[in-house]
Image (cartoon, grey):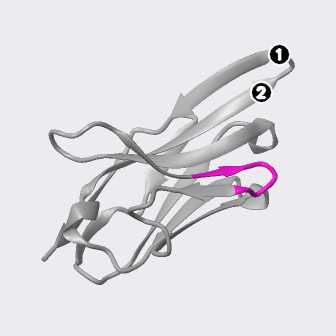
Amino acid sequence: QAQLVESGGGLVQAGGSLRLSCAVFISISSLYEMGWYRQAPGKQRELVARITDGRGTNYADSVEGRFTISRDNAKNALYLHMNSLQPEDTAVYYCYADQLVGRRKTNYWGQGTQVTVSS
């Protein structure tokens, strides 16, 4: 069973909005950091946003002010609200989570969801 499952991707026009969701099938309370990466065709995977269990957040400069990351431990979910989307935001978006149990660190990834922004 997949531990992280993304949804919410799709096709949107420039200037539009999408909300990505990441369903978490492991103990979310053990996840000290979660976030989103994206990978566009021919480009390296890049960090888009991350959030710690203390709710601290960081964003890539390219999405600062347009994207908002949040986590809902009660719903076992991570979200990425994306506004003012531009064609350069087109990519596969991946959810990730870093777990710490005792001294053991484990990194989890979702399968990705495609976001396509048309001009």
Q: How many labels were placed on the picture?
A: 2
**Where residue 87 appears, x then y in whole percent?**
20, 68
- The relative height of residue 33 versus residue 58 in the rendered view (above or below) is above
Up-down relation of residue 50 to residue 33 (above or below): below
Residue bearing the label numbered 1: 103
Quadrant containing the C terminus in the rendered view: bottom left
Q: Is residue 23 visible?
A: yes
Q: Is residue 86 above or below residue 51?
A: below
Along the horizontal axis of the image, is 35 left or right of 100? Answer: left
Tell me what residue is drawn at x 35 percent, y 80 percent: 84
Identity, as a three-letter code, of the amino acid under mark 2: Leu
Secondary structure of the residue carrying tag 2 is strand
Image point 31% across, 82% down: which residue?
A: 16
Q: Is the residue 13 above or below the residue 101 in the image?
A: below
Q: Are marks 2 and 1 in contact (CB under 8 Å)?
A: yes
How far apart are labels 2 and 1 at the CA level?
Answer: 7 Å
Q: Secondary structure at mark 1?
A: loop
Percent coordinates x, y for residue 2 in the rendering: 52, 33
Q: Which residues are magenta?
A: 50-56
The numbered dot on residue 100 is 2
Quarter-of-image position of residue 103: top right
Quarter holding residue 44: top left
Query: Quick one: which residue is furthest to the bottom in this view?
Result: 15
Classify 10 Å Cα crowding around label 1: few (below 14), some (14-19), many (20 and above).
few
Q: Measuring from the top left, give residue 27's x and y in whole percent.
A: 76, 38
Magenta stretch contains residue 85: no
Q: Give percent across and percent down for residue 45.
A: 34, 38
Residue placed furthest toward the top: 103
